[in-house]
């Protein structure tokens, strides 16, 4: 990958990183009370959705940090599991992805070996 491309991805990652740290979802988790039972159920599921969103965000935040450190180590753009190049189109959509599309699909199915690769890479980076 060329310098120019790397710099472009670095900028994209930093932008996303500051977007995520800028907004707070904590407010939507605050417990709201209602005398009406059905409303209370509604509040509860909204709260659960907000928590799912937070988990996803912290996952992305972690992946962004990893991607930035991989840019510094000059191994950005290769899959952490199979070490194949991740397609440029895929990186343009999700620049923080640690996986090529094939390994991503395996990770989505819960493939332990693939998921472990990302943990190992995190430890190496730390
Ligand atoms: Zn792969």
Image: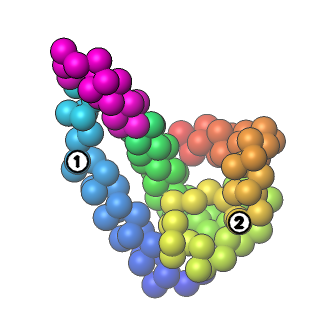
Closer to the camera in the image, 20 or 121: 20
User: Mark 2: which secondary structure?
Assistant: helix
Query: Depth check: 122 or 60 in front?
Result: 60
- When the figure is inspected, residue 72 is found, relative to residue 62, above or below; the finding is below
Tell me how far mark 1 sits from mark 2, CA to CA: 29 Å
Region of the chain picked out in magenta, as a range: 31-51
Residue at 80% x, 59% y: name it. Answer: 82
Determine crowd level at label 2: few under 14, some 14-19, many 20+ residues with C-alpha closer than 10 A: some
Q: What x and y, as percent, mark residue 42?
A: 33, 30
Q: Residue 70: where, in percent of width, then height?
A: 55, 59
Q: Earlier in the sequence, mark 1 or mark 2?
A: 1
The N terminus, quarter of image: bottom right
**Number of callouts in the render?**
2
- Residue that numbered label 2 is attached to: 101
Residue at image coords 77%, 63%: 102
Ligand 1 within 8 angstroms of badge 2 C-beta: yes
Q: Which residue is mark 1?
A: 23
Q: Position of residue 8 (x, y in %)?
A: 42, 78
Q: Is residue 13 magenta?
A: no
């Amino acid at each position: 990958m060329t310098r120019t491309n790397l710099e472009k991805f670095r900028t994209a990652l930093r932008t996303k990183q500051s977007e995520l740290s800028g907004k707070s979802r904590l407010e939507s988790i605050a417990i709201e009370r209602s005398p009406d039972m059905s409303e209370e159920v509604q509040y509860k599921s909204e709260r659960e959705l907000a928590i799912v969103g937070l988990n996803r965000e912290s996952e992305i935040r972690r992946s962004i940090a990893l991607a930035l450190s991989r840019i510094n180590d000059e191994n950005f753009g290769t899959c952490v599991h199979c070490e194949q190049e991740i397609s440029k189109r895929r990186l343009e959509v999700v620049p923080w992805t640690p996986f090529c599309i094939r390994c991503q699909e395996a990770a989505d199915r819960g493939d332990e070996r693939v998921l472990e690769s990302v943990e190992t890479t995190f430890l190496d980076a730390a």
